Amino acid sequence: MGTTAFAGAGLIGAVVQRVGTGLPVALGGFVLAMGSSLFWAVTGRLVPSWVKALGMLAGVGVLLTHPVVPDFAPVPLFVLAGELSSIASARMALAGAAGAVGLLSVTAATVGLVGYPVYVLGVLVGFAAGFMLRWYVRALDAERGKQEAVREQAMLGERQRIAREVHDVVAHSLSITLLHVTGARHGLSTDRDIDEAVAALTEAERVGRAAMADIRRTVGLLSKDSSGTRPLPGAGDVAVLVSETCAAGLAVDYELEGDVTAVGSAVGLGLYRIVQESLANVVKHAPSTKALVHLTIEAAEAHLTVRNGHDGGPLNPGGSGLAGMTARAEQLGARLTAGPEDGAWVVDVTVPLARGAAS
């Protein structure tokens, strides 16, 4: 639209310059040059670039049969060269620029054209500017595509992180809830201890409600709204996690060496989730064995070990628990190993601690 208006202004100026005996010819040249634009205005359809170029060259050629000084007629040729080099093929752009220079040369050689070198330079500048615009648009499109790819990758990473959070919360809460339900069923079926069964079911209900709150808070990360002010668990909550697991009926010992306040929130959450997933696997695969959770916090790193008597490995190697723990460890820059060791199944994690992590 802008190029058409600029070319039209030049043509109108050229027609006004030829008011008098050359006006009928000038009007004919104007119609030829603007024919494609007039066709678009009437029908709403665009003509091919080569048709527009031929019409413009023909119209300007007619105008230049009556040259004036200074002459506005060559100005549309500058616009034509720039437009073709920016939107048409390279061959079409070269043909259009060559046609414009050829028309100016023929006019200069036949009827005379004052300022011929300036007009040719204008065509060449328009040709170069069009190619620069084309390069800029392509570079801009490439940059937008790159940014979109980075944005999609970031969104995928965030979805995977939230999926791991939900998996860990659900797996652990279901495992603990099933232990309580099993205890209640055992109490009712063996000694008819209703109080014990009610206590177990009450604890199962509490664990389930807490899990639902954790899930809502985690899924709330997907929305722009606040998901609550309750902080995510950290290294200091591992003791509570072990205590809840013991209350559900699984034998777990917890040993802590060091100050948990030296562990930052990100590392603390990762360690908590790894312990949570490890204990859920113990409940699922070896509920009758005793587990040991050992956390050592030093100045430069934290070392976590979760050990249980089951040495057969995960019974479902296609599950996502071990993969989730591995992904968490990689995200924290930690070293994680999981496998049989001395007749037990051991999960071993070493996480580097950055200075000032506790803040």
Image (spheres, helix red, strand yellow):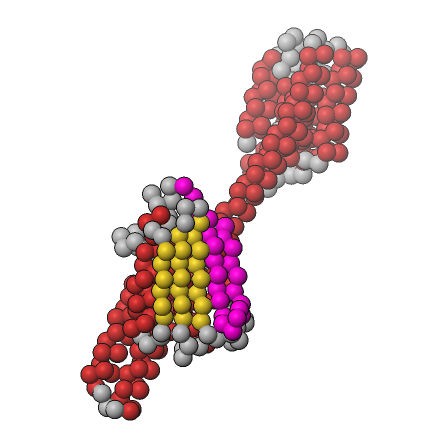
- The secondary structure that dominates the magenta segment is strand
Looking at the image, is 18 positioned above or below residue 232? above
In-front residue for pair 111/215: 215
* Image location of residue 59, percent across then percent down: 68, 25
What residue is rendered at 77% in x and 16% in y?
105
Residue positioned most to the left: 195
Side (left or right) of 277 relative to 12: left
Question: Where, quadrant-wise, is the N terminus in this rendering?
Answer: top right
What residue is rendered at 38% in x and 69% in y?
172
Residue 30 seen anywhere in this rendered image of the structure: no
What residue is rendered at 61% in x and 21% in y?
11
Side (left or right) of 300 relative to 191: right
Q: Give the range drawn in magenta.
A: 333-355
Q: In which quarter of the image is residue 127?
A: top right
352 is within the stretch colored magenta: yes
In-front residue for pair 87/187: 187
In-front residue for pair 121/348: 348
* Image location of residue 190, percent across then percent down: 29, 91
Side (left or right) of 24 relative to 98: left
